[in-house]
Image (spheres, rainbow, N blue to C red):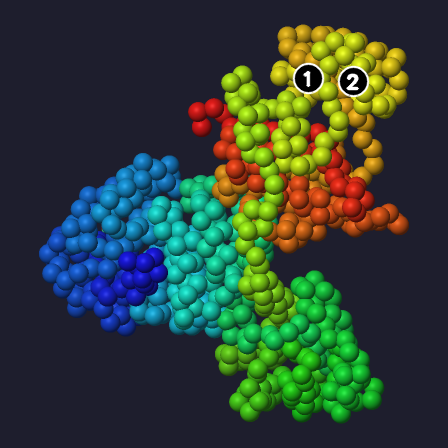
Amino acid sequence: MGKTTEMKYLFEPRSVAIIGASSSPDKIGYKIVENIKASGYKGKVFPINPKGGEILGYEVFPNIEDVKDDIDIAVISIPAKFVFDSLSGCAKKRVKFLLIIASGFSEIGNLEEEQKIVQYARQNGMRVLGPNIFGIFSASAPINATFGPKYIKSGSVAIITQSGALGVAMIGKTSAERIGLSAIVSVGNKSDIDEADLLEYLGSHKDTKVILMYIEGVKNGEKLISALYKVTKVKPVIAIKAGRSKRGAIAAASHTGSLAGSDEIFSDVMKQCGVLRAETIQEALNWSKFLATSPKPKGEDAVIITNGGGVGVIATDACEKFGVNLYDNLNDLKVTFSEVVPQFGSVKNPVDLTGQATILDYEKALQASLKSKSINSIICLFCETATFDANDFIGSLKNLSSNARFTKPVAFALFGGEKVESAVASLKREGFSAFTEVYEAVSSLGALYSHYRIAKELASQQSAEQELQKLSIDMDAISEIINIAKQEKRSFLFQNEAQAVMKAAGIRTPKTFIAKSLEEAVLFAERIGYPVVMKVVSRDILHKSDVGGVMLDLQTKEEVIDAYQVIMHNCKRRAPSARIDGIEIAEMIKGGVEVIAGARRDGAFGPIVMFGLGGKYVEVMKDVSFRAFPLTKREALKMISETKAYSLLLGTRGEERKDISSLIDAILKVGTILCKSKDISDIEINPLLIYDEGEGACALDIRVMLKPQGD
Ligand code: ACO
């Protein structure tokens, strides 16, 4: 059975057993049966309870094995300590999905019991949802196998939530906001089924237009990335992630027993996969509704229609913030709106109908925008005035939409007192995207455009693997270098070895020699040409500057002799037990923009690359961005452009543009080396000097760390 076919039975089960069904109305095992019944579920329902009897008209079976029919899903609502024992009956009945409601597993440190359940389920061909969940609602069945609210409005937004209580609350909130759900799935501890499995299914689920995820931590990030790449190409995925702050991350980890991970990395990786990350639950719900109900834009260029200059300006600011492009062909705007706008108004964008605008003026302006071939979306603003009642919008828009059909995205923001607020509520009830806040309207349109661009870009994107194949890296040479370090039981490479790794990847490094004596030091310095840099080489000294082991800008033979003696003296005094393997003599490199580029293995997402402003202030400036690996050149450029360092690379104050393509090449190469060598845990080049365009880059200081042996 294919993955999607298999998942279909979770969303469209033909039969359901409730283990722990109870006739006590205050128990979860009763609520679930009650909700299933109220949802109008057409399949077979088998409550299981040793007492037998009847619950809500359904025959109760003392044991699941007493049921004659096949069972697709079993909702298990008995205390954690009894769950495992209930599985053998499910296995005998060849149940497809176990939905384990009980809390008391990995989220409180009881990982062993959870793993025992998953292992048994896998051995017996069963998939596990949970534990620590409130269940599932699926409109396609329809089935409400949750202990949340009884009635859930059907629609086209699917919610995947890691938090149970928040998920239940979201059902209530979506209903209040008139957002219909195609499904809501509680994933809890994600012991087996996780967001990635559900995304794969929902990606091709015809009743789902938008997917909203609430995530606290990612367990299998590589699987999630691959699912997201597939889905965001075809439908919007909105994420709310808790655990942004340090304390929040700790709270999230203990809530669902998962690794919360670094928020910066999560954020950047989600961006890379085309996920729209909302700041708040309200924002996520606004976006979900707007994206689920709006037609797709056919192009950029939006127009603002307003009766107040002030809100027009606020909306213009918001457009810049949320990436909504405003149409600015003045001639065309004049032709389109001159008949609608009074002489003292403005036909520029924002189109200002002025404070005397009537509902008729709004209708005409909307019609003109809908007809225009150049305008692709509309932000319609209204400030409460005495010229007409906000409620007039309701009938007028209903008329307009039934005659002209809203073939373009239109976001409404109506601002004013109680009457206006109630008009907004009515518009929402009628299915229009109306807000009481200008920013909310524009942010929703911005989210729609973000998805529009993402889908276009992902559809045309070459696969990262294809691009990376073109890089030439001598992995055999790199393995040889690493083997030497491994034989010597080192967890890092010496600078000359790290430089050799760079050489094998075609990344330039300064000319370097290792001198074993003062005579050799002078000889090498003369060979390289002045000025030179000298650094101690020692397996026991990682931070060379701290012990006085680095001397820069040495101009003459005499300075080299002095520096050699000073370095030796400093190291003997400050690190008396360190083994000195020699002194590195290197070409002194100047100029270029100092950046940092690196790759490492992240606990949640696997191989990741990072880029940022380099030099010694890296930690303080925190001007870094991340991406999961592999990635395309285009995505690497995006990653670079998210930092402040990017403006330096573009050339500030009359400076030349820097060699950004060499930088991209270096980033892709360090990522590839890390991925291809199972022994490397970390590569960092800091600084990596980026010269003027066409002149390349040079890796000045390279740190290559190896995984602990035996890992
Ligand atoms: N097969 C069938 N029935 C059984 C079995 C079995 N193996 N074992 C026990 N039962 C019966 C019990 O006799 C009882 O029936 P009764 O009411 O007729 O006496 C029924 O199953 C339920 O068992 P209880 O021991 O009464 O358990 P209770 O219903 O109190 O609690 C529950 C079970 C809900 C799973 C609880 O242990 C739990 O974990 N609660 C937390 C749930 C939760 O928060 N989930 C996660 C997130 S959702 C959110 O946060 C909103």
**Quadrant of the drawing holding the C terminus:** top left
Amino acid tagged 1: Val
| 206 left or right of 577 in image | left
Instruction: Give the residue displayed 15% in from the left and 51% down from the top.
Output: 92
| 228 left or right of 194 in image | right
Q: Nearer the viewer, residue 679 or 625?
A: 679
Instruction: Give the residue displayed 55% in from the left and 67% down from the top.
Output: 286
Instruction: Give the residue displayed 73% in from the left and 75% down from the top.
Output: 327
Q: Which mark is residue 306?
A: none
Q: Nearer the viewer, residue 4 or 18?
A: 4
Mark 1 residue CB less than 8 A from any atom of ligand 1: no
The residue indicated by pointer 2 is 524
Residue 181 shows in the view: no
Residue 711 shows in the view: yes
Does dot 1 land on a helix, a strand or a loop? strand
Task: Estimate the x, y position of residue 35 in percent, counting from the top left.
Answer: 29, 65
Task: Estimate the x, y position of residue 244 in percent, counting from the top left.
Answer: 57, 47
Task: Estimate the x, y position of residue 280 in percent, counting from the top left.
Answer: 56, 58
Mark 2 residue CB less than 8 A from any atom of ligand 1: no
Residue 528 position (above or below residue 276): above
Q: Which mark is residue 537?
A: 1
3D distance between C-alphas at marks 2 and 1: 15 Å
Image quadrant where residue 347 sits: bottom right
Label 2 Cα crowd, 10 Å radius (few <14 / some 14-19 / many 20+): many
Labels 2, 1: front one: 2
Q: Nearer the viewer, residue 255 or 644?
A: 644
